[in-house]
């Protein structure tokens, strides 16, 4: 985009949104052509915006996420440590996934065994970082400043975690399913674990969880967890461990790195923005809230105003709590709403396509807002919800700006 147009679009954002927090959100949301500098993500991720260099964190702009199945090169990246050598290995005959802890028979599986001893499944599953949308919080939360793009819905292929757990025999004492990966702590210390999270055993036994070796019909890319990763949809993506080494069935709530303190936790009760909280007042995030994206058109679109023509837009909606019951779209700052057509999900935990078409009030500047509601009746809030110290779970309605030129 040339710099004149960029200034124009920035101008649009600034003129309409007075509150600093909104302005901040808008300016980042509007800078949709901010590409990753060459060489940081490799060619495969060249369209993503780099949010952190080392470890690599990169997100897609909403308009790049317009496919029902997210293309591999547009799937966000969130590394907490150093990508392990196994990620680029061409020979994984020695790789094993150990399952132990509260099980009848601790077992380690080779890739060959996973692929031949168990039925494989292919599902479209939403993976979303709990910090997606963090850039919208005020006072700001430290951490990766995700805007909209820390989410994707590619096709995953693998075996059911449930089938593996059934094969090894889960004991009655099982409370939590934890993972360990091969990635290396940023300090380089081989004894330090970067991240080791988990899910309650009931969630672990959900048949939609996969130990996945494939993404979009190919081997899992190195950066996404080759040779195998967990995919536990509906929860923060941080429970979907990459470069799997071990699944440890715990007799207590898992206490690995990034399970304790304030990591991936929100206050047990609503707090005023900026409140300092004790760790005991925080609880582990479980199901992710209802959310949506506007993937078409891209924010900043300018077009010739035509009085009798409907305006069309589309995107996706998803929720950790179940299917989407409604998506509505407004072009007048929420005064009136148009009901979108929402498609059924391809499978449980896949995102759902919505499309809407309606007349615009007239020429000029318009903001398109979308809001989704899930089967539990929860709707996306208009403004950034529930401030929390780490800036998780911002599921405010997505917005784009368009300009109908006279
Ligand atoms: N082993 C390991 N697993 C991990 C991570 C990691 O740093 N190491 N990051 C987690 C986080 S915070 C997220 S959001 C997702 C990101 O997955 P992706 O990079 O494939 O998009 O992986 C999760 N699994
Ligand atoms: Mo994450």
Image (spheres, helix red, strand yellow):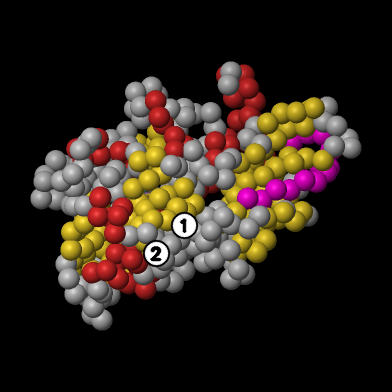
Classify 10 Å Cα crowding around label 1: few (below 14), some (14-19), many (20 and above).
many
Q: Quadrant of residue 388?
A: bottom left
Residue that appears at 20% across and 38% down: 91
Magenta segment: 353-365
Residue 340, label in figure:
none
Residue 285, label in figure:
2
Disc 1 from disc 2: Cα separation:
9 Å
Classify 10 Å Cα crowding around label 2: few (below 14), some (14-19), many (20 and above).
some
Q: Is mark 2 within 8 Å of ligand 2?
A: no
Q: Name the foreground residue: 29 vs 308.
A: 308
> Do tag 1 and tag 2 residues touch (Cβ < 8 Å)?
yes
The residue where tag 1 is placed is 393
Work out which quarter of the rendered image holds the C terminus and state it: top right
**Left or right of residue 238, residue 147 in this image:** right
Work out which quarter of the rendered image holds the N terminus and state it: top right
The x and y percentages for residue 86 are 21, 40
SS for callout 1: loop
The x and y percentages for residue 120 are 38, 56
**Left or right of residue 325, residue 184 in this image:** left
- Magenta stretch, main secondary structure class: strand
Residue that appears at 40% across and 71% down: 268
**Left or right of residue 200, residue 81 in this image:** left
Asked if the stretch drawn in magenta spans residue 355, the answer is yes
Asked whether residue 151 is in view, the answer is: no
Residue that appears at 14% across and 50% down: 192
């Amino acid at each position: 985009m040339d710099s004149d147009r960029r200034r124009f679009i920035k101008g649009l954002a600034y003129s309409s949104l007075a509150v600093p927090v909104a302005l901040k959100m808008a300016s980042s949301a509007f800078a949709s052509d901010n590409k990753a500098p060459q060489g940081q993500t490799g060619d495969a991720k060249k369209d993503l915006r780099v949010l952190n260099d080392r470890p690599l964190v990169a997100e897609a702009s909403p308009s790049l996420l317009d496919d029902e199945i997210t293309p591999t090169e547009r799937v966000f990246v969130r590394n907490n440590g150093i990508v392990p050598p196994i990620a680029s290995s061409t020979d994984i005959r020695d790789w094993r996934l150990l399952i132990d802890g509260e099980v009848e028979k601790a077992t380690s599986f080779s890739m060959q065994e996973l692929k031949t001893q168990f039925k494989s499944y292919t599902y479209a599953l939403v993976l979303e970082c709990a910090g997606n949308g963090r850039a919208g919080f005020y006072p700001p939360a430290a951490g990766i400043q995700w805007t909209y793009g820390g989410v994707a819905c590619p096709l995953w292929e693998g075996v059911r975690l449930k089938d593996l757990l059934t094969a090894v025999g889960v004991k009655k004492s099982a409370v939590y399913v934890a993972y360990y990966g091969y990635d290396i702590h940023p300090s380089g210390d081989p004894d330090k674990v970067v991240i080791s999270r988990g899910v309650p055993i009931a969630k672990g036994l959900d048949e939609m969880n996969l130990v996945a070796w494939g993404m979009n019909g190919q081997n899992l890319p190195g950066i996404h967890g080759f040779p195998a990763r967990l995919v536990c949809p509906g929860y923060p993506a941080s429970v979907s461990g990459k470069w799997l080494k071990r699944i440890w069935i715990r007799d207590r709530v898992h206490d690995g790195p990034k399970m304790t303190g304030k990591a991936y936790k929100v206050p047990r009760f609503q707090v005023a923005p900026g409140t300092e909280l004790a760790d005991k007042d925080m609880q582990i995030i479980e199901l992710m809230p209802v959310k949506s994206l506007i993937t078409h058109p891209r924010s900043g679109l300018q077009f010739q105003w035509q009085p009798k023509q409907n305006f069309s837009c589309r995107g996706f909606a998803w929720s950790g709590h179940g299917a989407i019951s409604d998506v509505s779209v407004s072009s007048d700052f929420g005064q009136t709403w148009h009901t979108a057509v929402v498609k059924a999900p391809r499978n449980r935990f896949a995102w759902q396509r919505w499309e809407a078409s309606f007349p615009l009030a007239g020429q000029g500047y318009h903001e398109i807002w979308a809001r989704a509601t899930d089967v539990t009746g929860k709707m996306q809030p208009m403004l950034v919800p529930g401030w929390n110290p780490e800036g998780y779970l911002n599921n405010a309605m997505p917005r784009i700006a368009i300009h109908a030129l006279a």
